[in-house]
């Protein structure tokens, strides 16, 4: 069952999305060679609690930490540990928080120093595919339209689109209906309606789309050991159009990256 949100509830959810956006911004300041994912996890937990919010992943389905930290060939759901990050690594960091009784859910794949050009390209294309998908999240479209757009964009570069893990509706629960696969067929699946809020989150592999689960019961890695990228935004349908609730602006501020991708997205969304 899809739980649509009122405009007031969407404003409350925007605050939850802001908590996770700001938290990944704080984490971004510390993402560099030598830091461990456990240290980053601590920064995130403090930052979330300082904002009067609650870590959303900690204890959810018994997950042991605040952040999912998935380096290199790990796709998602990696558990923070005390291994220092090294130059050339990438790490996908996924952050959840509860504020105003609503969840925010947000992810970004960071480069540690200089990374291989082919890995940088994977990051760039995966992030592009996030916006390509979000653009299809509008009144009258269907779940398959978002998945089709993401899949087409990524497979054009020869990348593998993970099948087993998907985006999802978001609200008072972390995972609400509908499931939002990053693959699909145009015009198929549930129809989008005003007030829907979803987390769109392409998980894209440099090589095969196939994955395996680690014996810890959590960590998902690519079957061929090649890198994987993950970017996630929270998006609502407002006045028929997709509206970003989360923002990478805090990450870009921390990293000194000039980016107007979200403004560009909004300008295009206005003329949908
Ligand atoms: Mg997430
Ligand atoms: Mg999610």
Image: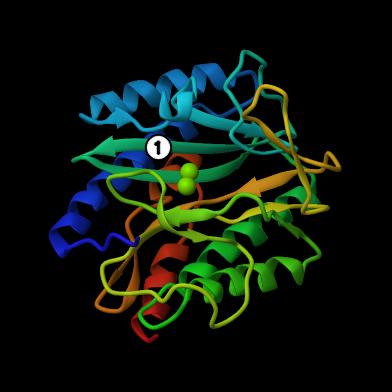
Image-based side of 159 in relation to 204, left or right = right
Q: Residue at x 81, y 64 (%)?
A: 158
Q: Is mark 1 within 8 Å of ligand 1?
A: yes
Name the quadrant containing residue 191: bottom left
Q: Position of residue 66 (x, y in %)?
A: 44, 26
Q: Position of residue 207 (x, y in %)?
A: 83, 52
Q: Residue at x 27, y 73 (%)?
A: 194
Assess disc 1: are there few (<14), some (14-19) or many (≥20) residues with their C-alpha within 10 Å of its C-alpha: many
Residue most extreme to the front: 1
Q: Nearer the viewer, residue 209 or 34?
A: 209
Image-based side of 146 in relation to 49, left or right = right
Image-based side of 240 in relation to 249, left or right = left
Q: Position of residue 94 (x, y in %)?
A: 50, 38
Q: Position of residue 57 (x, y in %)?
A: 42, 31
| Quadrant holding the N terminus | bottom left
Q: Which residue does the numbered mark 1 point to in the structure image?
A: 96
Residue most extreme to the top: 82
Q: Residue at x 51, y 61 (%)?
A: 180
| Number of numbered discs on residues | 1
Q: Nearer the viewer, residue 81 or 260?
A: 81
Image-based side of 183 in relation to 196, left or right = right
Secondary structure of the residue carrying tag 1 is strand
Q: Residue at x 47, y 64 (%)?
A: 261
Residue most extreme to the right: 224
Q: Is residue 150 above or below residue 32?
A: below
Residue most extreme to the bottom: 271
């Amino acid at each position: 069952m899809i739980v649509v949100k009122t405009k007031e509830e969407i404003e409350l959810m925007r605050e939850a999305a802001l908590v996770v956006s700001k938290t990944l911004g704080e984490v971004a300041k510390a993402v560099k060679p030598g830091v461990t994912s456990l240290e980053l996890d601590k920064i995130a937990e403090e930052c979330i609690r300082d904002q009067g919010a609650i870590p959303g992943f900690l204890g959810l389905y018994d997950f042991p930490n605040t952040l999912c930290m998935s380096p290199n060939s790990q796709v998602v759901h990696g558990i923070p540990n005390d291994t220092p990050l090294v130059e050339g690594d990438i790490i996908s960091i996924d952050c959840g928080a509860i504020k105003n009784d609503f969840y925010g859910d947000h992810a970004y794949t960071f480069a540690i120093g200089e990374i291989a050009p082919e890995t940088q390209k994977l990051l760039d294309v995966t992030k592009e595919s996030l916006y390509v998908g979000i653009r299809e999240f509008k009144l009258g479209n269907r779940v398959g339209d978002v998945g089709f757009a993401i899949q087409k964009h990524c497979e054009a570069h020869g990348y593998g689109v993970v099948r087993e893990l998907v985006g999802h509706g978001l609200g008072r629960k972390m995972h609400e209906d509908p499931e939002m696969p990053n693959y699909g067929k145009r015009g198929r699946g549930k129809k989008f309606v005003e007030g829907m809020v979803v987390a769109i989150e392409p998980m894209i592999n440099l090589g095969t789309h196939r994955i395996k689960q680690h014996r810890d019961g959590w960590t998902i890695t690519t079957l061929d050991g090649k890198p994987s990228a993950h970017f996630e935004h929270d998006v609502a349908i407002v006045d028929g159009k997709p509206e970003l609730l989360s923002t990478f602006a805090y990450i870009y501020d921390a990293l000194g990256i000039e980016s107007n991708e979200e403004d560009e997205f909004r300008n295009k969304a206005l003329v949908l």
